[in-house]
Image (tube, rainbow, N blue to C red):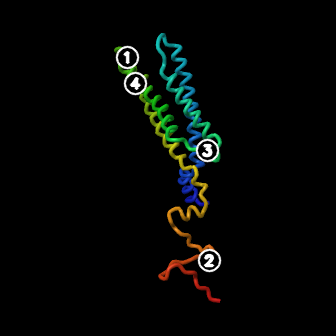
Amino acid sequence: MSVLENQFNGFVSILRPKDNVKRLNLFSKICMTVSILFWIRAIRNTRAMSKGYDLGVISFAGSTLSSFYLYLKTRGGVENFSAPTRLTRIIVLITHFIVVLNYAFGIYVAFNLGKVVYVKFAVYCISCTILWLFIAICGWKLQRNTTDTDVESFDKDELDTLYGFKSTTSIYSDTPLYAGSQGLTRPYYSS
């Protein structure tokens, strides 16, 4: 393959359902791992607090569960994959937005709790709010990209007639037809 073909295939791979399912699977594994780590951290923070609790216990539990669900749906590959319904995509998006809201609340607390601004905590919460917003959008887009998983199952005849185009080869012969001023004709062969 030439360099141009490799670049083209890399570009087109974003359109292949198999690659989209793999990306969603990878996304779910990474998101689930990060969510579990931060959920454990939230539990430790809650135990260290004298009163109240870290809201990450709830928000990261939701993110972990939705990521686990996506992992279960994608672990069999494109052959066993059924695209997430709109409701499923919305629920996954909501679980990620709950994490975003948790960090946004942390920004509010950092600036308004007591008479001191907790700068390190504010920077941490601002960074994580932006990161989880990005994660929520990526998750939504990855799920949307997997809704067309049956593209590779089209056969040649279906693709030829998909938009009303007719094949330029005869069904009776492998001799191609040529478009000219007299319509479609076969080339003239003299013997």
Q: How far across and how far down the image is residue 108, in percent?
A: 38, 23
In three-dimensional space, the C-alpha distance between marks 2 and 4, rounded to whole angstroms, equals 71 Å
Viewer-closest of 53 and 168:
168
Q: Earlier in the sequence, mark 3 or mark 4?
A: 3
Q: Amino acid at mark 1?
A: Leu
In three-dimensional space, the C-alpha distance between marks 3 and 4, rounded to whole angstroms, equals 39 Å
In the image, is residue 18 above or below residue 33? below
Question: Could you tell me which secondary element the residue under label 1 belongs to?
Answer: loop
- Residue reaching furthest left? 115
Q: Name the residue: 64% across, 47% down.
A: 79
Mark 1 sits on what residue?
113
Mark 2 sits on what residue?
175
Question: Could you tell me which secondary element the residue under label 3 belongs to?
Answer: loop
Q: Earlier in the sequence, mark 2 or mark 3?
A: 3
Q: Name the residue: 48% across, 10% down.
A: 50
Q: Amino acid at mark 3?
A: Phe
Q: How far across and how far down the image is residue 92, in percent?
A: 51, 35
Instruction: Please give the label number shown on residue 81.
Output: 3
Q: Amino acid at mark 4?
A: Ile
Location of residue 125 (image quadrant): top left
Front disc: 3 or 1: 3
Front disc: 2 or 4: 2
